[in-house]
Image: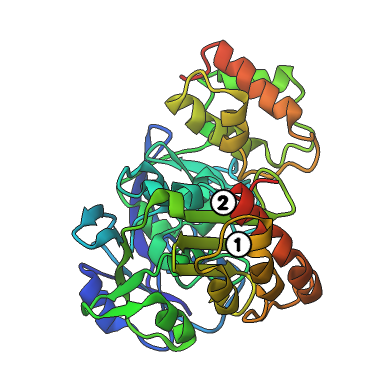
């Protein structure tokens, strides 16, 4: 039998979390699990205090974990991420789905987290502890404690690229998502739905560092772009197909901003 | 497990019900209140058939924990018509043959109402974006898009 516990603050809710609890933010993941009879939890924990604040700080951008995709789209400070939030769901999903929830979204979701990985974001826990997003994702399955916010280092808008490859237009779930920060000498390239969590394509990153963004300059990166990825078979696409088309989408992202 | 008391505004009327722990808003609307206009489709946020407005913004009632709407305003298709007078969107859908099986219609109407309330004269692209979270397996979407644009021309934001 399911129970719902509501706490005044995120800190109190965090204290109440156990292995049999799920924290409810926007509901798009937890209520789906409820609807499909997920027996992995029997307590829903929620907090009245929701941090939806999005603001620029000295080091970059801070996004409260309770901020929805619609909040991101409404924020001038988060303009860099508009291209990402706009590609998630329809308007109703964007009014519900939160940045904090997206950190835990399983495949084929988690596009926002893929972008955060490319942006070298930090995940801020309720206890104030900060974790690089790559470390957070590698331990995500065993993560305990609630998320208060994410912080995103300042990145020039021209250096950030995002692509979501879908079979259905204008909206559909992702076959794969690619996000890149093309800062010269410090390229970060992240793929979503190409592994158990969003993953960096580090071999391709090395090939792109200081490379010229033309056919010849990116050829090596395209060659090795799936080396660090672990795409799975699912109803959307096979692992083989994903490996075959990843260089095609990466080329579009690098040379044409993701357009065909 | 004890039920939780819940009060909210539904289409200008006040509602007070007791809800089971973990109940979704669509369950409360359909089974608790008797408003059958939101449809339960995929129950996972893909089809949009359950779309309702919460404080004027489209939400998926199948993925909304009922307890989270305490004190808030819910609008469903049941509240669109004013007595015998259909809402301009309903009229445009009817005149444009924009419903075939009709299962998606309620969600389409609420998604498009949210658009017209905010953007009274939308472009075709804005209409497509507004209903991009709503699936229709019958019409091919074009009659729906045309109906929303037609309703907008006739002052559909009401």
Rendered image: mark on residue A206? none
Q: Is residue A18 left or right of residue A171?
A: left
- The reply to the same-chain question for discs 1 and 2 is yes
Is A76 drawn above or below residue A239 in the view shown? above
Residue A110 visible in the current orientation: yes
Closer to us: A77 or A141: A77
User: Disc 1 sits on a residue from what chain?
Assistant: A
Q: Nearer the viewer, residue A134 or B124?
A: A134
Q: Which residue is mark 2?
A: A89
Q: Residue A119: name its quadrant.
A: bottom left
Q: Single out the residue that lies furthest toward the top.
A: B154
Q: Secondary structure at mark 1?
A: strand
Q: Is B142 left, or right, of A182 in this rendering?
A: right
Residue A80 locus on image (x, y percent): 40, 50
Residue B129, image x, y percentages: 58, 37
Q: CA distance from mark 1 to mark 2?
A: 14 Å
Q: Residue at x 43, y 27 (%)?
A: B118
Camera-side mark, 1 or 2 = 1
Circle 2 chain: A
Q: Indicate the position of residue A98 as horizontal and vertical percent values.
A: 41, 59
Task: Tell me where residue A120 appears, x and y as whole percent.
Answer: 39, 70
- Going 62% across and 81% down the picture, which residue do you hit? A228
Instruction: Quadrant for residue A249, please give it.
Output: bottom right
Residue drawn at (35%, 50%) of the image: A78
Count residues near mark 1 (Cα–Cα under 10 Å), then give few for <14, some for 14-19, many for 20+: many
Badge 2: few (under 14), some or many (20 or more) residues near its Cα, within 10 Å?
many
Q: Residue at x 77, y 23 (%)?
A: B97
Please tell me in which quadrant of the rendered image residue A148 appears: bottom left
A118 shown above or below B130: below
Task: Give whichever of discs 1 and 2 has the lower sequence position.
Answer: 2
Give the secondary structure at mark 2: loop
Residue for badge 1: A177
């Amino acid at each position: 039998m399911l129970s719902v516990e509501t706490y005044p603050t995120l800190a109190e809710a965090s204290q109440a979390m156990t292995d049999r609890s799920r924290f409810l933010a926007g509901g798009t993941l937890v209520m789906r699990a409820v609807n499909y009879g997920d027996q992995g939890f029997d307590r829903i924990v929620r907090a009245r205090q929701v941090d939806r604040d999005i603001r620029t700080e000295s080091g970059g951008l801070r996004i409260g974990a309770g901020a929805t995709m619609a909040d991101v789209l409404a924020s001038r400070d988060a303009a860099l991420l508009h291209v990402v939030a706009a590609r998630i769901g329809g308007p109703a999903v964007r009014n519900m789905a939160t940045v904090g929830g997206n950190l835990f979204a399983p495949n084929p979701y988690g596009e926002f987290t893929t972008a955060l990985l490319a942006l070298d974001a930090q995940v801020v826990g309720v206890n104030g502890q900060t974790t690089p997003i790559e470390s957070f994702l590698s331990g995500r399955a065993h993560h305990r404690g609630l998320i208060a916010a994410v912080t995103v280092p300042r990145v020039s808008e021209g250096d950030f690229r995002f692509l979501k490859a879908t079979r259905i237009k204008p909206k559909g779930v992702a076959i794969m998502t690619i996000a890149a920060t093309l800062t010269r000498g410090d390229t970060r390239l992240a793929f979503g739905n190409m592994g158990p969590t969003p993953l960096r394509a580090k071999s391709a990153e090395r090939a792109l560092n200081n490379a010229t963004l033309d056919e010849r300059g990116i050829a090596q990166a395209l060659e090795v772009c799936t080396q660090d990825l672990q795409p799975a078979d699912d109803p959307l696409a096979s692992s083989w197909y994903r490996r075959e088309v990843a260089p095609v989408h990466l080329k579009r992202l690098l040379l044409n901003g993701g357009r065909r | 497990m004890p039920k939780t008391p819940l009060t909210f505004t539904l289409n200008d009327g006040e509602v007070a019900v007791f809800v089971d722990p973990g109940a979704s808003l669509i369950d409360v609307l359909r089974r608790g209140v008797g408003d059958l206009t939101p449809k339960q489709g995929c129950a996972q946020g893909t089809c949009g058939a359950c779309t309702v407005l919460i404080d004027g913004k489209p939400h998926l009632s199948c993925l909304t924990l009922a307890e989270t709407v305490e004190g808030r305003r819910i609008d469903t298709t049941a509240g669109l018509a004013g007595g015998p007078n259909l809402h301009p969107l309903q009229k445009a859908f009817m005149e444009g043959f924009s419903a075939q099986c009709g299962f998606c219609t309620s969600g389409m109407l609420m998604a498009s109402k949210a658009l017209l309330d905010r953007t009274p004269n939308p472009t075709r692209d804005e209409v497509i974006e507004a209903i991009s979270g709503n699936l229709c397996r019958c019409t091919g979407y074009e009659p729906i898009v045309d109906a929303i644009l037609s309703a907008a021309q006739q002052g559909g934001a009401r």
